[in-house]
Image (cartoon, rainbow, N blue to C red):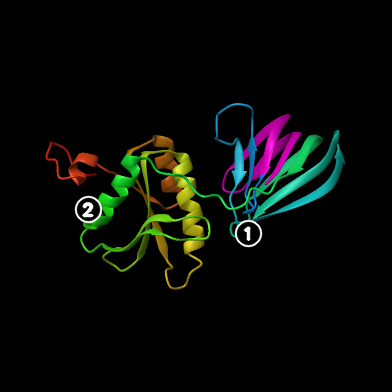
Amino acid sequence: MRLVIARCSVDYAGKLTAHLPMAPRLILIKADGSVSVHADDRAYKPLNWMNPPCTLREEKYEENGAIARWTVTHAKSGERLILTIEAILHDSSHELGVDPGLQKDGVEAHLQELLARHITTLGEGYTLIRREFPTAIGPVDILCRDADSTTVAIEIKRRGEIDGVEQLTRYLELLNRDPHLAPVRGVFAAQEIKPQARVLAADRGIDCVTLDYDALRGIQHEGTLF
């Protein structure tokens, strides 16, 4: 991972356009090619970002006090993230190695087990392929097929937020490279899903499902699984 602290402005050019005026910011360039721009607030959420597959081109750029321009281009959509840099305050690279992955809490692990056992909760004709389906970037919670035999990757959270949608997006990009599985669609399942996560999931063609933990355990009460 490369960490850069720079005084920069940021422009996003694609389906939507956005501009961040000149200010000091943290730029993260990860081994998977993703680039994200952060301020010193908002916890984990970046101000702007580009998911892989993408390329970063660094070039000298001397205009209005700037010293460099970095252009991040998405390989499929052609959308661009353009960083105009006035000064670089820090630039370092670090090898983090393979991450062991997030250890799920008891509720998430049990939700995964219950949903795999009752996979037709998602709809008639669903069949389980396996839990914890391995990939190069970590295991997919559940891989199954729907009634049309389309492969479905399911990411399960106790509380569904934007980072869970991002995680599932990365899995889908990888799984869809496998001709034996593609096309693979995604389902983001949680006991509670934040509105922002629903918007991002819809934008990426990912379905959202709200799970009722008690109903999956067979405890009868008013309400539905979805």
The residue furthest bottom is 180
Q: Which residue is mark 2?
A: 121
Near mark 2 (Cα within 10 A), the count class, few <14, some 14-19 or many ≥20, is some
| Position in image of residue 185 (x %, y %) | 40, 59
Q: Tell me which secondary structure the magenta stretch mostly adopts.
A: strand
Place of residue 108 in the rendered image (x, y in percent of width and height, measured from the top left): 34, 43
Mark closer to the chain start, 1 or 2: 1
Q: In the image, what residue occupies the spot 73% across and 29% down?
A: 24
Q: Residue at x 25, y 54 (%)?
A: 122
Closer to the observer: label 1 or label 2?
2
Residue farthest top in this picture: 41
Residue type for callout 2: Thr
Front position in the image: 169 or 204: 169
- What quarter of the picture does the C terminus occupy? top left
Q: Are marks 1 and 2 in contact (CB under 8 Å)?
A: no
Left or right: 218, with 38 as reference point: left
- The residue that disc 1 covers is 75
Residue 24: within the magenta? yes
Q: Magenta stretch: residue 25 in it?
A: yes
How far across and down, in percent of the image, does residue 176 sit? 48, 64
Instruction: Tell me: 146 left or right of 23.
Output: left
C-alpha distance separating marks 1 and 2? 37 Å
Residue 209 visible from this viewpoint: no
Q: Give the magenta part as a residue range.
A: 1-28
Residue type, mark 1 in image: Ala
Secondary structure beneath disc 2?
A: helix
